[in-house]
């Protein structure tokens, strides 16, 4: 399965589990009684389950449990500083760098030999930005490699995907050229992407398409490359390279010296960052660049830094994806070649600061190179923003729509009335067209994606002359318009996968998936989703019109996305430590730039890939204006001067937008910059589990590079719900002398009562996280040229802790009483499951969020799931050793053998919903029931809170082939990291009976601090002899993660578990405010590099 996706998914009817009644005990379930202690409440759990209707496995997903024998590609981080890290601490001559590189190569040789001895191969080696090797080895050999003294860490090789006439003025580019005279001249901008079409006029080429056609992209013909504009580069990939290909030969890069682009993405990016502009007559624009430049007539407007030089590093083939070991190799080369700014419009979801590409970015930054990268196109789900943009010292860029307040539209007259669609390429509309609904199977299969010509050609009777209805997912949006026209369709309509309209594309001149030049002349329409859910009825009405004729009339429609965050832009915080990412925002919807192979023509593309080069261009202007500034100061200028007012962005949300929209003019002119510890550029208070009030302080520094002292007043303000938190700055007024730096302390605090009132853990579920966020603003008392208000975002993800513990089990042979009490600071919900499996702490450090500790299952009446009375609801609970940031970075496979033949009949998979429905992560963790062939039987919203360690996966017994009289089954639990394909954990197998369980389960109790209750659980001794269980799991999502979230309760007569309290239950602690609590626990800065600065 690919490791980077785009967002998509379906939601449906809401359903909560009900508390089971005492009368049900004889049926083998459990009941709840209230203990004679304060205020426990017996009620449905706060974590309700939603049935997810219309879920179709359009992505061809297969559970990882079905592929146990596999080789994996990993990066071995080796002992010793890289050349770049050595150069950051002392100046190294070219000869010294060469000596250091050679010494590292020699030290890597024993590891190379070890890899080959384990049956593996060495793919790439690194010495400059990173010290390590990319290798392919059997998954079973990873433990041997990690045990070596010369191996510091084993990192996954993750698959990465590619992620200006209106946009450049929106970020004040022309004002920077005209007012300040900064155009990027003398600055080298490296583009790590699909290469660059250096024959195109936008990047200094001849503008003759024949020069592109006659160029052999595998070799450098005399006089073709480098050019005066594209001054260097290299192809690390080769045309056929595709890391995600099913053909093993295509997954191996074939480097060559010519970085000519055969896809188009990199050329578009280069043109946005540093293109010179192409006038309406097709001639190359040579300036002057000033505030009047936008008034000229352009085919393609100039990039943000139009006189900067370009370095082209190709890391993708003509189509498909790349592995991040190739990215690290390109960063190595950029450092060697003297790049000043690097742009990477690419990434992998769920980015961490510790991934090799992020580490390489930090190394480049310390060595003096500013690195800018796209945040990702996976949508606003929590913790989904990608790497390498996740690097602490890198600049992560989100996207917003800066196109126009109105867009072309089509008024469709259907048999049941009118419907508004966006005309997303602005094509001329025919007066009427018959509707053809593309399906995965005919006549009544799910609506298809339209991601190949064959899908269109397989429509019964053909699509010629028809308006073909498809659904968004897997391939680029505009690709289905290309495929549809190639199959003869008269129009293509795409139903979106959320309730918004899909973004406006503009003219479509190429297939964005393959880079193939192709002019789409048929209408490409878009309507709101979601199919089959009732969220809107746009798509369902079109499906109902299949085979009928609709009338089309051109109109204009308001653009509700104008000045708003793009629906595809990936959301923070950063996975692993909850730091602020993205950092800033720039235009990324329908951006016009270089059209590959066309000589002078434009292409229009949307994505954070387009926002990133705008910011890279802005960084080049700042670097030109301040050649003595280091990357931390350049980053501070971009973040500090960003604009979050309604003039630039609607509904500003720091978790999605960082500090706001880049203001190139102010970032270049400012003489004072704000910085924070470790080069992060924002204040990260982390994700902490709190038992009392807390106050944590962090440092914010102001550095004055100007010629006069500046006095600032500093204050913090929250965005959205502060969850009771307070923020203060001390000192709140500072004067910064020229050439000096002054530091202040920003304190974020929560009182004991605030902690008690924090939202329940289960509200941080299905892509949602509760975040305390805001901005500290430093306001100058005497503003003027170069002296502006400066912004520093802050963020924290606090969780109030309950402490639900079990007491000594009592009762007779057929019925047990299990007392529970909450001695924590926060309310908790205790939920009762059987305890079927236990597993030791046996997964490598850094991946223990997939390390299973215990697992079990509960049975509840089918009616609680909205099913038949004869059915049963099954709730599979899996508790892991350590917490994840988001469960969507994990796959949990529960294989079901429902007939005892030792083979898997169904699989209940805990997985990111978008991975199933669209082949694109969207951050929403679901329970999907699959047949081994990948057919979806059912789907439910899982309960697996952010920053937790326990997942509950629901399924109806009937969905896994169980019924009264044939209800016994074996379940096997295996977990997999989606961040590291070589890491998994098998917890073994256990038995259960959905209709005749051996022990009672399924009850819940909500417990206020200090409150208790007693579960009464039936024990069927006859069933227990056939279906043994260890006892019970008492799951409490608000407890401390790891073993705290799932107490293991053994049946009497066995050894007590360490978490089980065998004596009296402890008293609840008193809550304390920060003013009186000693000592004060601190919110950790997990994973933030160099917190001391």
Image (spheres, grey):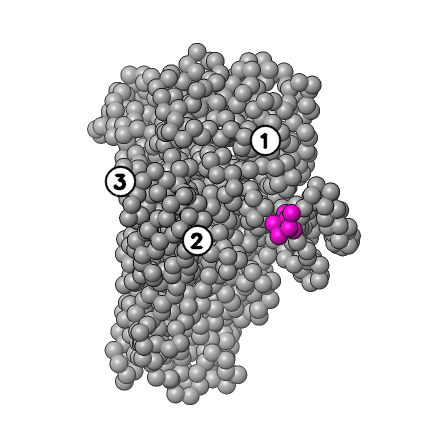
Instruction: Pinpoint residue 1065: horizontal percent, then vertical percent.
Output: 38, 84
Boundaries of the magenta span: 84-91
Which residue does the numbered mark 1 point to in the structure image?
312
Q: Quadrant of the N terminus?
A: top right
Res 333 → quadrant: top right
Disc 1 secondary structure class: strand
Alpha carbon distance from label 1 to label 3:
37 Å
Residue 273 position in % (x across, y down): 48, 31
Label 1 Cα crowd, 10 Å radius (few <14 / some 14-19 / many 20+):
many
Residue 940 visible, this orientation = no
Q: Nearer the viewer, mark 3 or mark 2?
A: 2
- Residue 324 part of the magenta segment: no
Magenta stretch contains residue 85: yes
Q: Quick one: SS at disc 2?
A: strand
Q: Which residue is mark 2?
A: 741
Q: Which residue is mark 3?
A: 646
Mark 2 is surrounded, within 10 Å at the Cα level, by few (under 14), some (14 to 19) or many (20 or more) other residues, namely some
Is 561 rendered above or below residue 940?
A: above
Q: Position of residue 531 (x, y in %)?
A: 34, 39
């Amino acid at each position: 399965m690919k490791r980077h996706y785009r967002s998509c998914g379906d939601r449906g009817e809401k359903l909560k589990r009900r508390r089971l009644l005492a009368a049900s005990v004889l049926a083998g379930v459990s009941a709840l009684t209230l203990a004679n202690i304060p205020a426990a409440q017996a009620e449905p759990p706060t974590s309700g389950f939603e049935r997810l209707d219309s879920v179709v496995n359009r992505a061809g997903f297969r559970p990882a449990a079905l592929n146990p024998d596999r080789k994996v590609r990993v990066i071995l981080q080796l002992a010793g500083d890289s050349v770049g890290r050595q150069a950051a601490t002392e100046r190294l001559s070219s000869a010294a760098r060469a000596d250091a590189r050679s010494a590292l190569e020699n030290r890597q040789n024993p590891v190379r030999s070890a890899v080959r001895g384990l049956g593996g191969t060495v793919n790439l080696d690194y010495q400059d930005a990173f010290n390590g090797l990319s290798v392919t080895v059997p998954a079973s050999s990873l433990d041997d490699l990690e045990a070596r003294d010369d191996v510091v860490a084993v990192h996954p090789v993750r698959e990465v995907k590619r992620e200006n006439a209106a946009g450049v003025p929106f970020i004040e580019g022309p004002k920077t050229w005209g007012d300040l005279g900064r155009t990027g001249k003398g600055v080298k901008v490296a583009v790590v992407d699909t290469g660059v079409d250096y024959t195109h006029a936008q990047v200094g080429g001849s503008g003759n398409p024949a020069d592109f056609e006659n160029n052999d992209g595998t070799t450098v013909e005399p006089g073709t490359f480098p050019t005066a504009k594209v001054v260097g580069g290299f192809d690390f990939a080769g045309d056929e390279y595709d890391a995600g290909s099913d053909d093993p030969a295509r997954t191996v890069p074939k480097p060559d010296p010519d970085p000519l682009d055969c896809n188009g993405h990199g050329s578009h990016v280069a043109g946005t960052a540093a293109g010179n502009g192409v006038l309406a007559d097709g001639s190359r624009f040579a300036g002057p660049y000033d505030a009047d430049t936008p008034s000229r007539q352009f085919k393609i407007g100039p990039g943000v830094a139009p006189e900067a030089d370009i370095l082209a590093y190709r890391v993708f083939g003509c189509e498909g994806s790349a592995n991040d070991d190739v990215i690290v190799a390109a960063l190595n080369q950029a450092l060697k070649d003297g790049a000043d700014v690097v742009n990477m419009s690419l990434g992998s979801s769920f980015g961490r600061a510790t991934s090799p590409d992020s580490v390489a970015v930090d190394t480049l930054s310390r060595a003096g190179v500013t690195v800018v990268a796209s945040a990702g196109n996976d949508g606003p789900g929590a913790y989904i923003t990608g790497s390498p943009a996740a690097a602490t010292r890198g600049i992560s860029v989100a996207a917003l729509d800066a196109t126009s307040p109105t867009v072309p539209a089509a008024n469709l007259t259907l048999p049941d009335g009118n419907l508004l669609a966006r005309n997303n390429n602005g094509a001329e509309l025919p007066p009427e067209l018959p509707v053809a609904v593309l399906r995965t199977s005919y006549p009544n299969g799910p609506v298809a994606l339209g991601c190949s010509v064959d899908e269109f050609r397989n429509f019964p009777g053909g699509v010629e002359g028809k308006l073909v209805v498809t659904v968004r997912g897997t391939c680029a949006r505009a690709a289905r318009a290309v495929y549809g026209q190639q199959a003869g369709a008269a129009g293509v309509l795409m139903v979106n996968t959320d309730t918004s309209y899909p973004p406006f594309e503009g003219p479509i001149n190429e297939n964005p998936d393959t880079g193939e030049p192709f002019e789409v002349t048929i209408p490409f329409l878009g309507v709101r989703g979601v199919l089959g859910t009732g969220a809107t009825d746009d798509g369902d009405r079109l499906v109902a019109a299949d085979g009928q004729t609709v009338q089309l009339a051109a109109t204009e429609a308001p653009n509700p996305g104008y000045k708003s965050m793009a629906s595809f832009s990936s959301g923070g915080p950063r996975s692993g430590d909850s730091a602020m990412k993205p950092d800033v925002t720039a235009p990324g919807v329908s951006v016009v730039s270089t059209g590959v192979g066309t000589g002078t023509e434009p292409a229009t593309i949307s994505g954070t890939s387009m926002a990133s080069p705008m910011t890279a261009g802005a960084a080049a202007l700042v670097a030109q204006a301040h050649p003595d500034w280091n990357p931390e100061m350049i980053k501070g200028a971009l973040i500090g001067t960003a604009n979050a007012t309604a003039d630039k962005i609607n509904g500003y949300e720091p978790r999605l937008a960082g500090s706001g929209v880049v203001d190139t003019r102010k970032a270049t002119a400012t003489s004072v910059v704000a910085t924070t510890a470790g080069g992060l550029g924002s204040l990260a208070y982390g994700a902490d589990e709190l038992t009392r009030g807390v106050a944590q302080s962090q440092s914010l520094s102001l550095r004055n590079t100007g010629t006069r002292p500046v006095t600032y007043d500093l204050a913090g303000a929250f965005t959205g719900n502060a969850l009771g938190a307070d923020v203060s700055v001390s000192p709140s007024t500072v004067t910064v002398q020229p050439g000096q730096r002054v530091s202040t302390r920003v304190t974020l605090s929560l009182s004991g009562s605030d902690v008690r009132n924090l939202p329940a853990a289960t509200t941080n579920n299905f892509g949602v996280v509760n975040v305390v966020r805001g901005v500290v603003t430093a306001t100058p008392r005497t503003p003027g040229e170069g002296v502006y208000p400066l912004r520093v975002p802050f963020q924290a993800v606090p969780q109030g802790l309950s402490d639900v513990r079990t007491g000594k089990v009592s009762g007779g042979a057929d019925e047990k009483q299990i007392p529970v009490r909450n001695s924590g600071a926060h309310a908790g919900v205790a939920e009762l499951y059987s305890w079927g499996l236990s597993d030791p702490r046996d997964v490598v450090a850094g991946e223990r969020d997939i390390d299973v500790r215990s697992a079990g299952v509960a049975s509840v009446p089918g009616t609680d799931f909205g099913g038949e009375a004869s059915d049963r609801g099954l709730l599979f609970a899996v508790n892991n050793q350590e917490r994840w940031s988001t469960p969507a970075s994990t796959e949990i496979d529960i294989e079901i053998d429902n007939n005892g033949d030792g083979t898997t009949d169904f699989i209940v998979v805990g997985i990111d919903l978008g991975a199933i429905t669209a082949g694109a992560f969207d951050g929403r963790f679901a329970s999907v029931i699959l047949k081994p062939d990948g057919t979806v039987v059912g789907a439910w919203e899982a309960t697996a809170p952010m920053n937790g360690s326990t997942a509950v996966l629901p399924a109806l017994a009937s969905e896994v082939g169980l019924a009264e009289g044939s209800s016994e089954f074996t379940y096997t639990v295996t977990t997999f990291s989606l961040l590291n394909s070589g890491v998994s954990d098998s917890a073994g197998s256990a038995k259960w009976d959905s209709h005749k369980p051996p022990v009672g389960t399924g009850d819940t109790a909500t417990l206020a601090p200090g409150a208790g209750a007693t579960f009464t659980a039936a024990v069927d001794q006859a069933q227990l002899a056939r279906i043994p269980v260890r006892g019970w799991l008492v799951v409490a999502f608000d407890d401390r993660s790891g073993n705290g979230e799932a107490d293991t309760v053994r049946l009497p007569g066995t050894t007590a578990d360490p978490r089980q309290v065998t004596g009296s239950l402890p008293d609840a602690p008193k809550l304390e405010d920060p003013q009186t609590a000693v000592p004060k626990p601190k919110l950790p800065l997990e994973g933030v590099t160099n917190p001391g600065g």
